[in-house]
Amino acid sequence: MAPESRHWINNEFVESDAKETITLHSPYDESVVGTVPVADEQVVDSAVAAARKAFETGPWPTFTAAQRAQCLLKFADLIQTKADEIAQIEAESIGQPVAFAKMIVGACVATYRYYAGWTDKVAGESYKEEDGTYRIVQYEPFGVCAGIAAWNATALYLGWKMAPALAAGNTFVFKSSEKAPFTPLIVAELYKEAGFPPGVVNFVSGGGSTGQLLSAHMDIDKISFTGSGITGRKVQDAAAKSNLKKVTLELGGKSPAVVFEDANIENAISQNSQMFLMNTSQVCAATSRVFVQKSIADKFIEALKGAFKGAEGAFQNPKEPTTMLGPLADKLQYDRVMSFIQSGKSESGAELLVGGDKIEGQKGFFVQPTIFLNPKEDAKIYREEIFGPVLNIKTFETEEEAIKLANDTAYGLASAVYTASVSRALRVASKIRAGTVGVNAVAFPSAITPFGGYKQSGYGRELGKAGIMAYLQEKTISINMAV
Ligand code: NAD
């Protein structure tokens, strides 16, 4: 049966006579997964109008914090029942292994539960009378918010963007990626079942043209974008040229991992191989530049090479429950990663240590886990985000040198430090210019702490208290005490 593909507006699936559609193919066997309509101006307008009406006049603005929490908690319970279905469709659409996709659903559930707890926790401020004026600061939702998502973990973005926005009392229009449009449509009716009134949650499908319509829309108050820096700039530009809607940008990275000689080597190896390769390294926070101290470099590099070689067998049919690693998301992504590898071989000055080709004997867009040693400073593979299983390694001698290398990037999303010394870990963590630092582990985003980028990895934060504050604005009320 073809997956649900209609837009979800005002708590209903809506038919649209779309001039444009997108057909998705499995990156494993190229079978057709389904076709979605591209939301045009009329569809986007009707989704935004539904969200506006729900925010201004629907029952939603009268909901108490406890009622909003109830909706979020119920949805968290309900989405869990769809974990298998979501995992299957993500495996078919982007080749994500079902086991990993279910973990992502788990993270989405945790995010809804976490923000349910926040609905009544954002207090205002008050200032005692001064010069005859008493002042109150209260926090209010923006109104109509929109989310534009990357494809690598759609259920995660349903949580990171929508859970805090809804907890804060906003209404939402979410646009999935054109590579992974089905998960929101699988769960759409669950929002209704959970008690969200019509128009509070709306889903539209489409690619860049739909994203552009949302970014430039005159009646959207805030937009939260996850994707590449190039597109993020377009979103910000369109926001600036339209109604100056507030923008949060969650962009890419070229994150460093620094391995000191006193690190637990086995742990550093597994973090920089198994964990790095998770989701076929199509992870924004992947630490794709590894810096290892010279005294342990030979041993570390040999072991990491072995781990990468050994991981090749884990790339299998993503629909099998035991599969750890899948193909790249589609042909475009495969071609992109292979072109980086080609550039690594021909112009980076680096030594190819392992990988560097497609995986033989496998149908689908499988690429060997690949390591390059000592690329030139200006090599494309060293500077640009690849979003695939390709790692760069360089060596260093001193802590200062390691910090300099780690920070020598336009990005600042994530990082990791491997050492047995707590004081060194904290010293280095404080000097790394990134939104997240993992000590002796890759730093998995957690619902309770903020996640987001320094430098060109974006601005604004998702998750944690910062995540809900990003969907609220301050209002100061001054009271003339003389009257
Ligand atoms: P992308 O920039 O190609 O697309 C992201 C989204 O933007 C898609 O929904 C797409 O349809 C939409 N879009 C395209 N053109 C647009 C336009 N002109 N205006 C508005 N929207 C437009 O990125 P991608 O390939 O989907 O995702 C990979 C990128 O996302 C990587 O750079 C990765 O690091 C980044 N990412 C960041 C995070 C984070 O939290 N920081 C998480 C995951 C992925």
Image (cartoon, grey):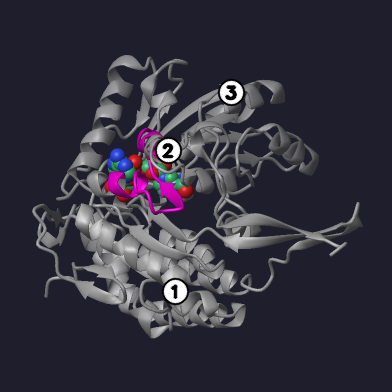
Q: Measuring 54% from the left and 79% from the top, which residue is drawn there? A: 62
Q: Which amino acid, by three-letter code, is at mark 2?
A: Gln
Q: Which amino acid, by three-letter code, is at mark 3?
A: Leu
Quadrant location, the N terminus: bottom left
Quadrant location, the C terminus: bottom right
Report the side of 351 relative to 341 (left or right): right
At numbered mark 1, what does the secondary structure look like: helix, strand or loop? loop
* Distance from the alpha carbon under mark 3 to that under mark 2: 30 Å
* The stretch drawn in magenta includes residue 219: yes
Q: Which residues are magenta?
A: 212-235
Residue to which mark 1 is pinned: 57
* Distance from the alpha carbon under mark 1 to that under mark 2: 29 Å
**Disc 3 or 2, which lies upstream in sequence?**
2
Residue to which mark 2 is pinned: 236
At numbered mark 2, what does the secondary structure look like: helix, strand or loop? helix
Near-viewer residue (111 or 345): 111
Q: Classify mark 2: residues with Cα within 10 Å, few (<14), some (14-19) or many (20+).
A: many
Near-viewer residue (172 or 32): 172
